[in-house]
Image (spheres, grey):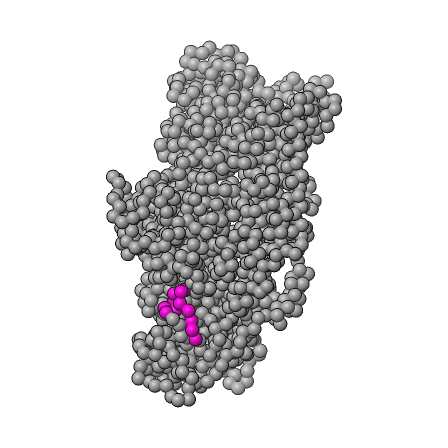
Amino acid sequence: MKVLRWQIVIALLVTFPMAATAQPDVGDVLIRNGTLLTVTNGTLENTDLLIRKGKITAIGKNLTAPEGCRVIDATGLFVMPGIIDAHSHIALEAINEMSSPLTPEVRMRDALNPLDISIYRALAGGVTTIQTLHGSANAIGGQSVVMKLRYGTLNPTELIFEGAPRGIKFALGENPTRVHGAGHNMVPRTRMGVEFVIRSALTEAREYQKKWDEYNEQKMKRGFRGAPPEYDDRLETLAEILRGNIIVHCHSYRADEIVMIMKVCRDFGIKKLVLQHANEGFKVAPEIAAFGAMASVFSDAWAYKFEVYYSTAYNAAILTRNGVLTSINSDDPGVIRHLYHEASKTLKYGGLSRDEALALITINPAKQLGIDNRVGSLEVGKDGDVAIFRGHPLSIYTVPVMTIVDGIVRFDREKDPDDMRIYVDPEERFDQSGFEVPEGYHDCLGTATETFHQLFESH
Amino acid sequence: MRRFVANTIWIAVGALLVFTTAVAQDQELAPVSDTYAIRNVTIFPSPGRRIEKGTIIIRNGLIDGVGENVPIPPTAIIIEGDSLFAYPAFIEGLSKTGVKTPGEDDHSRIEDPGNPPPHRAGINPQRDVRDYLDPNDPNIKELRCAGFGASQVVPRGILLPGSAAVILLGGKTPDEMVLKPRSACYSELTSNKTVYPSTVMAVLAKWRELYHQAELARDYAAIYATNATGLPRPETNRTLEAFYPVTTRQQPVLFRASKVLDVQRVLALQKELGFVLILGDVSEGWDITDMIKASGARVFLSLDIPEDPEEKKKSKKDSLENAELKALTKRRSEFIQKMTAQAAAFDSAGIKFGFSALDTKYSDLHKNLRSMVEAGLNPDAALAALTINAAEILGIDDRLGTIEKGKIANVALFSKPIFDKDAKVMTVFVDGALYTCTEKDAHKKTASTVEGTWRMTAQTPKEEIELKVVLRKSVGKHYSGTITGTRMPEGIELTDVTLDGKTLKFMYDVLLEGKPQEVVVEGDVEGKTFKGKITVGEYGNYPIEGTKDPER
Amino acid sequence: MNRFVLLVNAFLLLFVMPGEAQVPKGSYGPVALVGATAHTITDGIIENCTIILRDGKIEAIGSNVSAPADVRVIDCKGLHVYPGFIDGGTRLGLTEIGSEPRTLDYNEVGNVVPQMRALTAVNPNSALIPVTRVNGVTTVLAAPSGGMLSGTAALINLHGYTPDQMYAGFEGVVLTFPSTSREGPNDKRKPEEISKAAAKAMKKLNEVWQKAIEYNKLDSALGDNKPDYYPELIALQPVIQGTMPLIIEVNGAGDILSALEWVREKEIARVILSGVREGWRVAGKIAEAGIPVITGKVLTLPDRAYDRYDRAYANPGLMRKAGVTVALRTNEAYNVRNLPYNAGVAAAHGLGKEEALRAITIVPAQIFGVADRLGSLETGKDATLFVCDGDPLEPATNIKYLFIKGWDIPLVSRQTLLYDEFLHREPGLQTHD
């Protein structure tokens, strides 16, 4: 009887790991007389936007501010939905569990770091929501977190985007083959091996699920006597993917591996697939569109390794024109601060319209993360997540001046002090400066490489 | 016959000691009496209570009486407590005092870093700290001489190093020291960086999985135990078995969680799994007291306070402009101030807490406590955290935590009230045994007539024995010292040195023919000379004389 | 691991070079750009301007110039002309694929190897070069890095079939000044260890410099007889003699001050500071020293957690305001094409549009001593310029024509070729069976 009870509890835990109890702070604010870039409903000049209790309650002319509501004069300013980054690794104390090519059981929420100054810096680039992911060392990595940049809280739970679907990192190509193949002399050392590792893991999960289903069924029968199958958190998580409860975010570059992962997903009935990076996605754009997968890409990063040598900055445009829902991501604590600029490059590379370009960093990533009912555009009923710019956000001369999350101003260029750390290092010295993030450094790549050398090459 | 015996004795006193010093040096052999009376002492039996000129009777390891007019048994060794202050010896909740590193000899290559043998990944909940206790660890003495009498100690290691135990900071064998075995399942969010789990998120994933597996295994084992016939044999698994009492909430988990994020991670895990939690080594908890309080977790706060780098810095070339530098150093100092005021914040929040000494320099413990009090911690609350609250958290408040009749005789005698900056621990009773704590700088200031080096000559029937006795001031009439001799070059600790008027008396212990024998030297001091007798256990007594070396 | 690398390299040699999509070649001949708005940089903006390009030079420029009969006329009405942009610090031409060591030619073995010449290793056929120039970046400094004196950098034009054809008239020895900064996120050294390492490097640098001076004295004393072959010291002679600048890579505020002191002490005649990420902290001191700065990249993070979030964006403007001569760089290889955007962000954060443009044209040309040929639209200068349909710092702007030393460069790179091929792929989606 106890066994049964715990099975239910376990099932609950696995299904709803984000039983977040923390209630995030919400606020009221009236943004007056701005140029609203709604993304889904064109540009509205000289328009007001009212946020009450963290939600957009009105968009229109001459709205009146309710009693005690903060009013922001946006005359001459541009107001757009808070920017969304579908691929980041900020606000984490660890990124890669690279000891095994399969680590679906690990949850990035366990490594969340609300104190990371990168959160504030991203806000200062108009970003309000991100997905922060496991690294790309493993064919199947850990579960990601969709979070709002509620910088100022100490409580990791308060950062979590309540109700966002679960996501998980997969990774193909050079990173997993280098870490495990070259590093440990283990499968996968090739792209063949990567496919095999994923297929065998999913197959095992299917069998695992079957065993438990059978056990649970048998157990209901009168007089049943038997041992429960072994509980395995890794396979539990994979089974959840098979049930369609987790979106697969697959780090992938080359056309062939993109086709491969779509075949694997098709064979296992996995429908929710977002190709991350997909530098050669443009080469198989028709196939991606036909599968119904989405793509989250770099604006112009390339050549930092061989599998991205045949890239093009026109990737986002080609994908978009071929009907693939596409977003532009940062994968980097520096780039996340100017995603609006990254999106603006598509005006040049492929001639996307301004609304299309803005969609790449707002409504499209919202759809990829399954949160487009809440964020990604300026619409009544959506969350009060807003970025205000001096100058059009797709102009190089634009400057973000204010960022609002749930109706609360979390970044204010005029008022914020220089030092925005929440906690400080009691042993810090001030006579030595920090470091520049090296060029071509992407956490997916960089951390994997460097830690790999640290950990495995020395032994 | 007598002559012969005497010769044997003297050879034995010297020779045997050479071989037994390693043990004998720190070994506390039985004193003349196990009854002590500390009289005329200011007693703080529990926080907020104070007895002036009281008496504490210690007998058989227990406190036999406390109060103003307590009769002193004739067998009692009397300690004059004038000018002394007695506290329940302190209790700390998380340290590795007296704990050896497990001898790991497995350095074989791990073929699959994703699936290492559990012990290499730090998953050793079946280990027991009792197997790693070393009664001779000098840290025991050091912590004791900071006024502590008990400590919850944990095995060294990562992730799940094993079960903790509450020990008394005195005793000759590990078992003698242990007050409460398996007091908690100890865990850290640390990992072996090269194998699974290597990161904090994998550590937590592994924790959950072990917990769930343990629950299933526990329940199935119960079913199997009732009627095994026809059922598949459950595999025994010591890792999971060690988790059973955690899953049934019979054993708390003592989690080391120093930083604010680690505390929250541990609280989230506890909320998810439901085990009984004790947080240890908390150093950044002041902003999350509500959360901690709501969780019901018990807490041991870190006694460590980082040193402000400004104070140790010698005009390093700073490239920052003055205003910026000033602002930054101010923020840093304010943060250190918050760390210092953490205990006060917990007290105001109404959270019962103790302290942990892990990673704190023991010599800084009093200074840090004083800083905490200066930062707003109520002295009584500080005292409670060091005594009764710690005892309650550890579930030993029926035995420790106050100076009360019937409790274990763990008493610390201070030279001043404890939050006085000149307060020094003079003597600590642990489990009824007396330990003296002498300080190097103390004897400089209060040089007395007997303090110093004495050259003594004992006249035995066969030969003259040269002895060198070094005496240091301790508490009141008490001194401490060592003795070395021709055949005992290593020197041994004197167990009880007193100067009562002119009479100097000291004792030490030797092994003779396999039996411990007490040697008692007693005589009169006249200026720099000493004349008296030396008694060697049941073998009889002989004359002894000595002179004191000139002061340097 | 090694075998793996070898395999990858073999693969690269077999397939990459021959298989690469080819960019069409440039054309040469006299051209008249007619009716443009010319942004001369040094002489203001000339509306309705005609520019005659002949023999690789700007033959004439002005609103009253008319196109001779023998030239190809390009109607530039509504378009803008700018001098080609100059990136003051890159690894372009010296690297192809970041993670493949055999394609990296900027970091020779050895800590003191100033004799390593970047110009030797510049690969004129790098796929990165066309990708860069189609965005208006025509000239870059290709710089070695890695050691303390890691080699001699070269200014190159992004067109030519041999390094010599690309050479744009400047070389400089690169010194990475001993650093007391943390080198990266995985630099876990204790502060004391960093200071110690910096002190050790400083000692080494002084030793090298002393030897270089001694070598110079010996060389002068010997007259026609040369002292013994000592390649490291020979490479430093032009710097000692003041005929070649020393490019000092330095970033931390404290290190910048130390570098300024060192330069004063060693009486080095020509110096360029490069990097200078914390220049804003000590801008007054740099201005006082009168040493020009090449800083960047701009689109990056502040150095310290407590720094204001936009320090890197504002750094060029803050230094300029203090009176420092400021040029910009990307410090990149793959995305040197983003130089205009770095300038734009600096412009918006205090540098101003005009100064930002100067910082990627005439200022670097002056710093490199090639302002007689590059950096502005002036008669007699190289015909290295581009025509675009708007503000060239704006991503929405498209470049229409690009000339490098009079060569009309097709606006084609492998990335545009891939676009052309894959926008509407043939065959498209193949339905099964």
Q: Nearer the viewer, residue A284 or C65?
A: A284
Say whether residue B408 is visible: yes
The residue drawn where x is 37% and y is 52% is A41
Is residue C400 one of those drawn in magenta?
Answer: yes
Q: Give the magenta part as a residue range.
A: C390-401
- Residue B407 left/right relative to C43: right
- Residue B339 left/right relative to B61: left
Quarter where residue A29 is shown = top left
Quarter where residue B163 is shown = top right
Say whether residue C208 is visible: no
Q: Quadrant of the C terminus of chain C?
A: bottom right
Q: Which residue extends farthest front?
A: C433
Looking at the magenta stretch, what is its main secondary structure? loop
The residue drawn where x is 57% and y is 70% is C21
Q: Is residue C362 above or below residue C31?
A: above
**Residue C2 screen position, x and y as percent:** 66, 60
The residue drawn where x is 45% and y is 15% is B66
Q: Nearer the viewer, residue B323 or A412?
A: A412
**Residue A283 screen position, x and y as percent:** 56, 61
**Residue B91 screen position, x and y as percent:** 49, 26
**Residue B464 screen position, x and y as percent:** 64, 28
Quarter where residue C316 is shown = bottom left
Q: Which residue extends farthest bottom?
A: C69
Q: Nearer the viewer, residue B134 or C276?
A: C276
Is residue B505 one of those drawn in magenta?
Answer: no
The residue drawn where x is 51% and y is 55% is A324
Q: Which residue extends farthest right?
A: B230
Q: Is residue B432 above or below residue A241?
A: above
